[in-house]
Image (cartoon, rainbow, N blue to C red):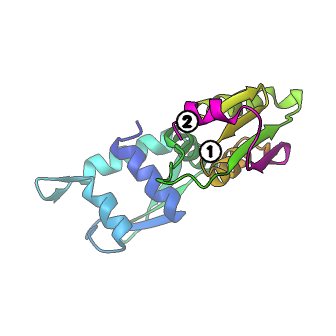
Amino acid sequence: MKNSKPFKLLKTVALTGAVVIALSSPFGGTKLIQELIGNYLEKKRFAREKFLQDLKRLQTRKLINYRELNDERIEITITKRGEEKVLQYKIDEMALKMPKQWDGLWRLVMFDIPHYHKKARDAFRRKLGDLKFYPLQKSVFITPYPCEDEIDFLGTFYKIRSCVLVLYVKNFEGEEKLRHYFHI
């Protein structure tokens, strides 16, 4: 579903919070709305029925709310569940940016997440592995790449940010092994 038209619609609504689209002339409005409508063009014609069908599907799944206004406009708002779905996809697509030149700092991510947040702890640990962090221990990971924004996002998403600590380390014993692992 990540690259589907309904998901692109959901992402657009998530970016704007709420959207009002005039169905009589859907090509007006911001560049974001024009891009959204562009996903529903078939042979240079707006596929209104397909658009409304996708809106109904998203509303059935409780990801958006929409209502048709009396002047051929539609108001679309994202639900809490829709926001969570968009965030979940952002997490799935997340990757660390690897700068051309290493700044010489290691980012050591440590966490002590209570047992009652076991699912969040396990998901956080898995995601650090997906992001190619090197595990030093079960709750200690390291990377040479900037990761502050990603750690903040993950910590906030899993509601564990206060349990996560990021340390900046210049050098340490055994560094050569990790330089080889990260190809730096």
Residue that numbered label 1 is attached to: 144
Up/down of 67 relative to 123, above or below: below
Tags 1 and 2 touching, CB below 8 Å: yes
Q: Which picture quadrant has residue 125?
A: top right
Can residue 95 be seen by looking at this rendering? Answer: yes
Q: Is mark 1 on a helix, strand or loop?
A: loop
135 or 118: which is nearer to us? 135
90 or 102: which is nearer to us? 102
Q: Residue at x 77, y 48 (%)?
A: 166
Q: Which residue is drawn at 34% across and 50% down?
A: 52
Q: Residue at x 79, y 30 (%)?
A: 139
Q: How many labels does the image show?
A: 2
Spatial CA span between label 1 and label 2 = 8 Å
Range drawn in magenta: 161-184
Residue that numbered label 2 is attached to: 182
| Percent coordinates x, y for residue 123 in the rendering | 68, 30
Up/down of 161 relative to 76, above or below: above
Give, as a three-letter code, the residue at label 1: Pro
